[in-house]
Image: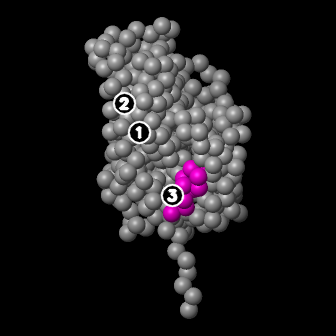
Amino acid sequence: MEQKKIDHDFSLRAVPLSNRNGFWRMLMVMLGFTFFSASMIAGGALGLGLSMTQFIWIVLAGNLILGLYTGALAYISAKTGLSTHLLTRYAFGEKGSYVSSFLLSATQIGWFGVGVAMFAVPVQKVTGIDTSVLIILFGLLMTATAFFGMKALTILSFIAVPAIIVLGGYSAFGAVNDIGGVDALMQHKPTEALGVAAALTIGVGSFISGGTLTPDFTRFAKSPKVGVSTTVIAFLIGNSLMFAFGAIGAIVTGQSDIAEVMFMQGLIIPAIIVLGLNIWTTNDNAVYAASLGISNITKIKKNKVVIVNGIIGTILAMWLYNNFTGFLTTLGSVLPPIGAILIADYFIVRRGKYPAFETMTFKAVNWNAMAAWVIGAGAAKFLPGIPPLNGLIGAAAVYVVLSVIAAKSAEAKLNLNMEKVTES
């Protein structure tokens, strides 16, 4: 009798409790998730535009907002065992979830390609190794860890997280000593001051798009407590550390990426290690999450999809790097309202209870969710204030209001039909 192949990544169903991970495994995965080169670039912008006291408060506030947002998503996924893409079926409907899955996946494949090039370009300058060779090699390695799933992501994170902290920390302390120590750093004054709204937009916006995919990883948490605590800690510590590395580098050397600072310090091998691991822990998560999204649409198991996505991202790496970074950033701004709608649907509309995924009959499309998504994205783009928060609050509020109106309309219609039956 032929044995069925087991999908160890549970791309099309809930993760069973027997396959969940405890606190330390989840913490390493989530720290690896938040070790993101773009956060260092954002940290550099904040470091140059704020005093160090302002920088500390903005980073803490921004990562607290991110922690609350991603922590809420972590709770839902740990409770249900479902990925972002399977969760969207409850709020958006089955066919509606395909739209969000496609946009989320396309964005992550794009960033995967950009990340591969972000490694290849500076390493080629330092080592002289052909850029194409580096792109193919690194693309294959990152695709491989995503192919082998959560276990490989966990092993990589256990290696990468301490290495980045130790080597990056060593470089950052060296840079601080070069300008006269911590006291001199704290005396830093911005040349062109950033306002609070602009600073928070940078702080929150740098990772809120990727944070929407938190459930793809925290569905493996042993309990909601483990999922939420590791996610919040990762943002408050891991993402804050990336911001700090970026700020120190920008203030001392004019370079936000700690790997670039290390190149300038003559730490060539450590710089390549830090740069590679930093991008790797983000990129394998990106292609992994993208593949779960394509699995939701095609019903093909994740492992097969990972190979295709990794090849596409690797082939297009330099083209994406040179032409599409701005577009991907813009596209990313329409993604956070998806997470806001999931949170509103679970906690407010459904009051913390989802029917079991295996027995649930989903709508084809929930147009209330689609409308709320469009309005949330519009609020992020056009309303004054802090765009990421405008998008989150706008989408959630509109979705709740439309859901209440729809429920009352359905109830009124049911009562009317019952009255007609009684009269007849």
Residue 171: mark: 2
State the image coordinates of residue 220 (x, y, percent, origin top left): 42, 58
Instruction: List the residue tagged with mark 3.
Output: 145
Q: Residue at x 38, y 51 (%)?
A: 159
Tell me if mark 2 has few (under 14), some (14-19) or many (20+) residues whose alpha carbon lies within 10 angstroms of its own.
Answer: many
Q: What range is drawn magenta here? A: 137-148
User: Which quadrant: the N terminus?
Assistant: bottom right
Q: Residue at x 45, y 59 (%)?
A: 152
Q: Is residue 68 left or right of residue 380?
A: left
Closer mark to the observer between disc 2 and disc 3: 2
Instruction: List the residue tagged with mark 1.
Output: 270
Check disc 2 and give the amino acid type: Ser
235 falls in the magenta region = no
Q: Earlier in the sequence, mark 1 or mark 3?
A: 3
Whether label 1 touches label 2, CB < 8 Å: yes
Q: Which residue is drawn at 40% across and 47% down?
A: 160
| Residue 342 makes an appearance in the image | no
Question: Secondary structure of the magenta portion, mostly?
Answer: helix
Give the total number of marks visible in the rendering. 3
Check disc 1 and give the amino acid type: Pro
Instruction: Measure the C-alpha gap from mark 2 to mark 3.
Output: 28 Å
User: Which quadrant: the C terminus?
Assistant: bottom right
